[in-house]
Amino acid sequence: MERAISIFTSVFSNHKATSELRSEIVRKALHFLIALAPSMAAINKTATVAFLLVGTLGYTLMEYLRLSGIKVPVISSITSIASRPRDIGKFVMGPVTLGLGALLALLLYPSNAAAIAIYALAFGDGIASLAGRFLGKHRPAFLLGKSIEGSLACFSVVFVSAYAVSGRFYVALVAAFTATAIEALPLEDYDNLAIPIAVGLAVQFAAFV
């Protein structure tokens, strides 16, 4: 009997871990896709802004339909897979704040600053979450529940992407520090707004120093 219970628990745990991994991968794939926005904006900024706005509004409508029991093919399934336990039965805000974060960066900042801000959102926040979830072992109190491994991953990828865009060490350093500090805050889905706005502002300031 004890052996059977042990086997069942092991299978259940593995299934749960696989489900969580799949959910995290889908969420971060959406994060990484937003990194296409700067390249699209370089071709046609107006069309990119319109695409992000329409996409965000369209998702909002489909999410309300899903909560009303009307499932939209593909979109509702992806939303269900990507949702966190805290999102069950609620409006899943992540894609909305993600789209708005990229949209605000494009509207508020010049192209290079907007690109750095969006890459910080796409790669910094995305990689930090993956590293923290699967590699994070050290979680000091000053990181408010986040891991050192996740924060280091965030800093590294934002620094590299910011330096690739700006070619300036100081600008990349400021962008990386800002993104890492904001990512460590317990903002949940609203870090998708805070990171690009804060990083874009910091980069703008650093560029004039």
Image (spheres, rainbow, N blue to C red):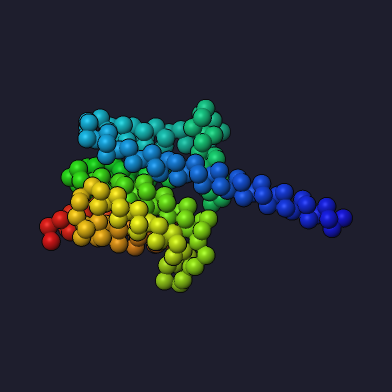
Residue at figure coordinates x 51%, y 29% from the top left: 74
Q: Residue furthest left?
A: 208
Q: Residue at x 20, y 43 (%)?
A: 111
Residue 57: percent from left, percent from top: 37, 35
Q: Front-most of 123 and 200?
A: 123
Q: Can residue 26 be seen in this view?
A: yes
Would you say 94 lies left or right of 182 here?
right
Q: Position of residue 9 (x, y in %)?
A: 74, 53
Residue 42 sits in which quadrant? top left
- Residue 153 x, y percent position in the rendering: 40, 57
Splitting the image into 4 quarters, where does residue 150 fall? bottom left
Any part of residue 91 in sight: no
* Outermost top residue: 73
Q: Where is residue 143 in the image (x, y as percent from the top left)?
A: 42, 67
In terms of depth relative to the viewer, which is nearer, 161 or 58?
161
Instruction: Please give the name of the residue rendered at 23% of the width and 47% of the height, measured from the top-left corner.
Output: 165
Q: Which of 83 and 70 is in front in this view?
A: 83
Q: Is residue 60 above or below residue 191?
A: above
Residue at screen point 39% across, 42% down: 32
Q: In which quarter of the image is the N terminus?
A: bottom right
33 sits to left or right of 6: left
Q: Which quadrant does the C terminus fall into?
A: bottom left
Left or right of 74 on screen, residue 38: left
Q: Is residue 155 above or below residue 109?
A: below
